[in-house]
Amino acid sequence: MVFKINNQITAPQLRLIDEQDNNVGVLSLADALKLAKERGLDLIEISPVAVPPVAKIISHDKFRYQQEKKEKKQRAAQKNTGMKQVQISVREAKNDLMMKAKRADEFLTEGHQVEVVMSLRGREKGNINFAKGKLAEFLPYISVENKIISPIQPGGRGLQVIVARK
């Protein structure tokens, strides 16, 4: 977002906030600019859509730094949701499935979707119903409340199902 600074501001009246975040009140543009100049700082229009628009007395460099920090934090928060994958096999024992379910729990609590992939090799591909049953048996081991986004379906070299947190 582009903010208007000092002489770029066109509104005749401004609600002014000083450098300590105190509300100064509604002033004319000339008075606000004069006050900012006396303090050796800049006048930045923060909220142009408010009536009257809100402006703040602050150093432009400091304000830019704060905005960049805020945007960086928002970008970091957005990257958190994605797709993670847990691979299981038809031949795995119950304890192995429990360990992989615990890993899926971790992914779900972090906010990711989990794709559970059961890879089938050789003759395993001939007994799809057994593999579907084994995959359906794995899903209740996931202890975090979840919902199935896409049902068990063939994909890749076997079967897959996508699970997300409720």
Image (cartoon, rainbow, N blue to C red):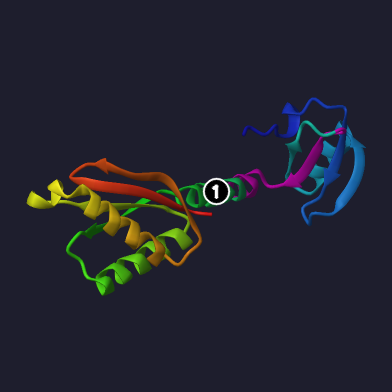
Label 1 amino acid? Gln
Instruction: Out of 145 and 67, give the one closest to the viewer.
Output: 145
Residue 32, image x, y percentages: 85, 39
Residue 47, image x, y percentages: 76, 37
Residue that badge 1 annotates: 74
Q: Which residues are magenta?
A: 51-65
In the picture, measured across the screen, residue 32 lies left or right of residue 165, that is right
Residue at horizontal 17 percent and vertical 50 percent from the top? 127
Mark 1 neighbour density, 10 Å: few (under 14) some (14–19) many (20 or more): few
In the picture, measured across the screen, residue 127 lies left or right of residue 116, that is left
Q: Which of the 4 image quadrants contains residue 26?
A: top right
Secondary structure under tag 1 reads helix
Determine whether 11 is above or below 152 in the image: above
Does the magenta portion include 70? no
Residue 100 visible within the image: yes
In the picture, measured across the screen, residue 25 lies left or right of residue 157, that is right
Residue 86 visible within the image: no
Question: Which quadrant is the N terminus positioned in?
Answer: top right
